[in-house]
């Protein structure tokens, strides 16, 4: 039996398959102190409770991202080394807006982005998303095979989020490079060289976005950056000390939102599409059903997100001493929400390891989070994934795994779960 005390959150083996440890935690210690001041929350009930209580479990001060150090990866971070501080001298000033925001300022930014990415607004992108998806498929369909991640699932969300933001499609390869490099800092344990590379990529991306925001100020268009340029925010609630009641957002604030949309929207949808394709190929009866009846695609997407959650974990800080799940959590502790575990909690989902598109409760997952930080891109993620699968399953017949080419391993990252590659073969429709 797996013992929760053997849990090594940042080991390669754990990240490759964390599920036995999630189960062990749920059985033995649903709120588990892995080292002094570091707690992991794995149960569906407690995650739902904590995510809805930002006064006790805050996201600011870098809480969301794990940035641990030491032998086991659980020691608190030390001050950045001079080489990183040097790179950060060229950074756009960092602002807490969404993921790293807390009430009341968070709600102000959040309301603006909610409007920009509302289901109605997102629906207007449908024809463009269809074009993006079909152009990508056109590029490989005659080959009868492809590596789905490089050639499709990574490119769909990048292209779509660039459309939503209003940044040039011609720079997609550059966004991809920045996103892939900058998320490696969220991996868990990383080398000093990786930290330098990830920081360099993040600073380059933020400066690029700052230039785009400044240029867009001349003539704000009908996209997220344009919306944010035109918007005003309540000065008090944004934490300002000016006498002005409302003020426009400054460039670093818009850059903060744009960066999060680009990075959070990319890895997540990429993994959803690739892991869901794999789960369908491993469950041919359900694949056949969905091909016969594409109206099942939305349910299939929800079940894919539950079974293999693209965001496995994000952190919070405890703002006060609190008794939680029978455990004493001192103020200042790191509290890590294991969304991927909650979505496989037996007390919430029957036979949670099974992929089943007919589950009654498949929309109860917390893959998009819960409470005030619930994913602001959920409507966009659902729409682009639906269009992606309508096109993939409609155009690629006799879909199958390429023999001998797949090892089904995952990238080393504690937060984002993603397959390294998925080679498939098919016949042209
Ligand atoms: C399958 C796809 C996706 C999954 C599984 C996912 C998952 C999540 C989760 C779990 C959170 C909660 C964070 C927290 O509790 O602190 C979140 C928040 C967020 N997501 Fe997503 N996401 C997806 C797609 C997207 C897309 C397409 C975008 C943007 C275009 C996006 C942008 C964001 C942002 C900016 C936040 C922060 C919201 C806030 O703090 O108010 N996500 N997402």
Image (tube, rainbow, N blue to C red):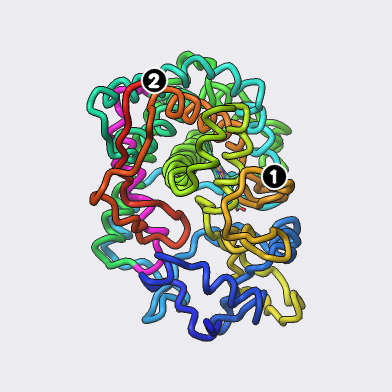
The circle on residue 134 is: 2
Q: Residue drawn at (32%, 32%), measured in percent from left and top?
A: 426
How many numbered marks does the figure carry?
Answer: 2
User: Which residue position holds label 1?
Assistant: 363
Task: Point out the image quarter for the N terminus.
Answer: bottom right
Inspect the magenta stretch and tell me whether residue 181 lies in it. yes
**76 and 149: which one is in front?**
149
x and y percent of residue 23 in the render? Answer: 59, 72
x and y percent of residue 247 in the render? Answer: 64, 31
Q: Where in the image, quadrant-wise, is ligand 1 located? A: top right
x and y percent of residue 7 in the render? Answer: 49, 79
Q: Secondary structure at mark 1?
A: helix
Query: Are dots 1 and 2 in contact, CB under 8 Å?
Result: no
Q: Residue drawn at (42%, 28%), measured in percent from left and top?
A: 392
Q: Earlier in the sequence, mark 1 or mark 2?
A: 2
x and y percent of residue 304 in the render? Answer: 55, 46
Q: Which residues are magenta?
A: 168-189
Residue 391, image quadrant: top left
In this image, 85 relative to 265: left or right? left
Secondary structure, magenta segment, majority class = helix
Q: Determine whether 216 is above or below 354 in the image.
A: above
Q: Secondary structure at mark 2?
A: helix
**150 and 290: which one is in front?**
290
**322 and 8: which one is in front?**
8
Q: Determine whether 302 is above or below 217 in the image.
A: below
Q: Residue drawn at (62%, 67%), measured in percent from left and top?
A: 317
């Amino acid at each position: 039996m797996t013992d929760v005390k053997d849990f090594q959150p940042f080991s390669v083996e754990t990240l490759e398959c964390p599920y036995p440890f999630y189960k062990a935690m749920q059985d033995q210690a649903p709120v588990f102190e892995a080292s002094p001041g570091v707690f992991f929350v794995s149960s569906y009930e407690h995650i739902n409770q904590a995510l809805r209580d930002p006064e006790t479990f805050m996201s600011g001060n870098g809480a969301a991202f794990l940035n641990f150090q030491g032998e086991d990866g659980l020691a608190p971070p030390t001050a950045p080394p001079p080489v990183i501080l040097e790179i950060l001298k060229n950074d756009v000033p960092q602002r807490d807006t969404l993921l790293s925001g807390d009430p009341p300022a968070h709600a102000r930014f959040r309301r603006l982005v909610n409007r920009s990415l509302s289901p109605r607004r997102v629906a207007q992108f449908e024809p463009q998303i269809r074009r993006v998806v079909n152009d990508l498929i056109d590029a490989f369909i005659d080959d009868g095979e492809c590596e789905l991640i490089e050639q499709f699932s990574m490119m769909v969300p990048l292209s779509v989020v660039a459309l939503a933001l209003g940044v040039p499609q011609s720079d997609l390869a550059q966004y991809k490079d920045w996103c892939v490099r900058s998320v490696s800092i969220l991996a868990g344990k990383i080398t000093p060289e990786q930290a330098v590379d990830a920081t360099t990529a993040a600073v380059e991306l933020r400066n690029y976005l700052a230039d785009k925001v400044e240029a867009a100020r001349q003539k704000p268009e009908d996209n997220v950056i344009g919306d944010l340029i035109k918007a005003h925010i309540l000065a008090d609630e944004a934490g300002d000390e000016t006498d002005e009641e409302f003020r426009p957002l400054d460039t670093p604030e818009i850059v903060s939102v744009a960066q999060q949309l680009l990075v959070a929207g990319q890895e997540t949808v990429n993994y959803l599409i690739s892991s869901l394709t794999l789960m369908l190929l491993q469950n041919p009866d359900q694949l056949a059903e969905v091909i016969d009846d594409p109206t099942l695609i939305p349910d299939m997407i929800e079940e894919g997100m539950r079974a293999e959650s693209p965001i496995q974990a994000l952190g919070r800080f405890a703002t006060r001493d609190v008794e939680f799940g029978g455990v004493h959590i001192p103020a200042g502790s790191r509290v890590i929400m294991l969304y991927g575990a909650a979505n496989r909690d037996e007390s919430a989902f029957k036979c949670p390891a099974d992929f089943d598109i007919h589950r009654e409760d498949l929309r109860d997952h917390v893959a998009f989070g819960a409470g005030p930080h619930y994913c602001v891109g959920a409507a966009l993620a659902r729409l682009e994934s639906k269009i992606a699968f309508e096109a993939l399953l409609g155009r690629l017949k006799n879909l199958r795994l390429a023999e001998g080419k797949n090892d089904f391993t995952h990238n080393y990252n504690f937060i984002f779960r993603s397959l390294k590659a998925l080679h498939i073969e098919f016949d042209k429709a």
